[in-house]
Amino acid sequence: MVGTILAILAGAALIALALYFGLRGRAAPAAPAGPDLAAGLERLRAAILEAQSIQRRELSGAVAQSQQGITTALVQQLGQLGDSNAQRLDALRATVDARLKDLQAENAGKLEEMRKTVDEKLQSTLEQRLGQSFKQVADWLEQLNKGLGEMRSLAVGVGDLKRLMGNVKTRGILAEGHLQTLLEQVLTPEQYARNVVTRPGSNERVEFAIKMPGGLDGQPCWLPIDAKFPREDYERLQDAQDRADKDAADAAGLALERQIRLEAKSIREKYVAPPATTDFAILFLPTEGLYAEVLRRPGLFEALQREFHVSVAGPTNLLAILNSLQMGFRTLAIEKRSSEVWHVLGAVKTEFGKFGTMLEKVRDKLDQARNQIDDTSVRSRAIERKLRGVEALPEGETAEMLPAPETSETDER
């Protein structure tokens, strides 16, 4: 700003000097330039410099005064602003404190209400749960009492069953009934028989035998199935295992193995006689535990098949065997039916050829009838042309002159 003012003043001084010398030149054109001109210029420069210095000092003082005034005003405004902010902060603090007190009081009231509500809910829920728990405990006690009564009855029934199972004949009947149930579930009554003499010339009858195809002279080939239940040996083995008595368990296992071998040998000698029967028979064990114990004996299952041609089966295993046999029976029936169907198709083919010949004859007859109808239509149109000039009579007179012929039931049909 100061430089701009100085530049303006210098320019004004130069313009004034130019005007001065211009006017002087006009007044005395012949005066030569000399030392006076240089002195004047020097004085003018000195005056300009002095004026610039004065102006600079004045401007510096004005700027300093202006800065001091601005600083003072800013300090005053900052002080006022600080006081105002302090007052506002005090008011805000007081407002916040009041609101906090109100919120604390309100929260305390709500917490008290919530505590009362929760206490009431907890009390009611606790009473309800305790009531339900006591009721449930009472129900459990009642069920326990009922279960104890049932267990007493069951214990009596188990004792009766134990006495019943102690009879060898009764055990055989139970095993035989289980075997019959499995056979009835899978096979039809025509596919098996009961109490069959499978060995020719013998009076020994096997409990059940399945009819297999491939017999001699139209007779079925029987697959013997006999049910055995060595309960005493198996129970001794179970008792020894429960007591963790290894010696007793080994002895009971060997006794069970000997009994199974004896039963397999008896089945082989009594019921297996190829070709009247298959070259093997099935020894049915009515419980899965007994069957699993036989399988657990090393080499017993294979030895029975190799030495006596007897295969041991439990309930599940026998059911799988019967299902596979049933699928084989169905396959044989389908093959038999397929040959019959093939013969029927041959007969149908022959009859179908005759049917084609009959269709040709019917078509010829229809063609002749169509030609006859066409000829009749031509004759009818010719008669109509001849009768165009004849006047038609009323229907009444026509009916009297040409009465309609009487139709019989045969004609109407």
Image: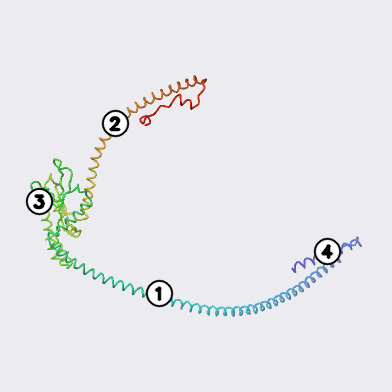
* Residue 60, position as x, y percentages in the image: 74, 73
- Marks 2 and 1 close (CB-CB < 8 Å): no
Q: Amino acid at mark 3?
A: Glu
Q: Secondary structure at mark 3?
A: loop
Most extreme residue toward the left, as rendered?
201
| Quadrant of image for the C terminus | top left
Q: What residue is pinned by disc 3? A: 204
Q: Earlier in the sequence, mark 4 or mark 2?
A: 4
Would residue 46 appear left or right of 154 to someone viewing this image?
Answer: right
Q: CA distance from mark 4 to mark 3?
A: 162 Å
- Observer-nearest of 171 and 189: 189
Q: What residue is pinned by disc 2? A: 351
- Marks 4 and 2 close (CB-CB < 8 Å): no
Q: CA distance from mark 2 to mark 1?
A: 89 Å
Q: Amino acid at mark 1?
A: Thr
Q: Which mark is residue 125?
A: 1
Q: Nearer the viewer, mark 4 or mark 2?
A: 2
Residue drawn at 33 percent across, 73 percent down:
135
Q: What residue is pinned by disc 4? A: 15
Q: CA distance from mark 1 to mark 4?
A: 109 Å
* Residue 295, position as x, y percentages in the image: 18, 57
Q: Secondary structure at mark 1?
A: helix
